[in-house]
Amino acid sequence: MEQQFQIEERSEGSATIVTVSGEIDVATAPQLQESLHALIAQGRSSLVIDLLAVTFLDSTALGVLVGALKRCREQGGDLQLVMADARIMKIFEITGLITVFPIVDSLAAVGHS
Amino acid sequence: MSDVSDGVGVDTLGVGDRVELTFPARGDLVVLARLVSSAISARAGFDIEELEDLRLAVGELCLLALQGSDAHHGELRVEFTCSDETLDISCTLVSDGPAPDAWSGGAEALQLSEQILAALVDEYGRDDQDGMVRAWLRKRRRGPLA
């Protein structure tokens, strides 16, 4: 059974961790965009996007993440991605975005749990 | 679809078999094309990695066809055609309105879609014909059709 799309956020120190689950596609990416833009507008520009529970991701999702990365960096922050699934990683590899985003394979790797 | 008498199992797609899926041209329904793609790819003899590639590629194909369209207008028609070496998939936006002339996601989104398709399938393209936008792809099997 497909995991339902969900976004949860929490603050840890100076960073905001955004945990996304389910499929991020043309139908759900606008919700993610809205959430990320709202956080950045609040000055929370150090974001960690936890994609460990994401089961599918397409070009619209990539577009949202790239846009959020630019906004974070414009405000002096950054956007890190947490992912471990080879399928998800492959999409970043084939689009060259693997060299654009800071990517780690666990929240512990960025000092969070 | 083929049956056992064609020398093809009941759960497989044989040469020349064609499946068509039509649904309202809305982004939230693109998941239907991905689901059908997985089922058809498996029946057309693709392995699990190719199946996942095609699932992603079909979603991108729908995005290419939907570009610039009114999301609440028209239908998307996705056609899967099996040959002895390839699976051909086309996605056509059937709309009464004017042909879309702009990529709604912008040049960056178009580039991402094309990068994904270029990496996952053997051939792909997009054309406008008679007011209909059609995006298509061709994926070759690694092995012969069983």
Image (tube, coloured by chain):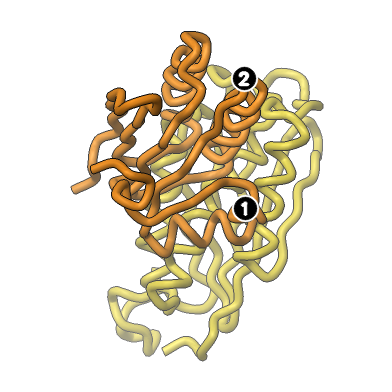
Chain colours: A orange, B yellow
Q: In the drawing, what numbered circle is on residue A75?
A: 2
Name the spot of residue B36 as percent of width and height, x first: 39, 53
> Disc 1 designates what residue?
B90
Give the residue type that dot 1 points to: Ser
Residue at 74% x, 45% y is: B111
The extreme top residue here reads A42
Pick the front one: B36 or B102: B102
Question: Is residue B16 placed above or below A26 in the rendered structure?
Answer: below
At mark 1, the secondary structure is: strand
Q: Position of residue B110 (x, y in %)?
A: 72, 40
Res B94 visible: no
- Identified at 43% across, 53% down, the residue is A104
- Residue B98 in percent (x, y) is at 77, 20
In this picture, residue B45 sits left or right of residue B134: left
A29 vs B36, nearest the viewer: A29
Give the crowd class for mark 1: few <14, some 14-19, many >=20 residues within 10 Å: many
Please tell me in which quadrant of the rendered image residue A113 appears.
top left
Quarter of the view holding residue A72: top right
Q: How many marks?
A: 2
Query: Tag 1, which chain?
Result: B
Residue appearing at x 65%, y 60% in the figure:
B137
Disc number for residue B34: none
What element does badge 2 sit on?
Answer: loop
Amino acid carrying label 2: it is Gln
- In the image, residue A27 sits, relative to residue A104, either above or below, namely above
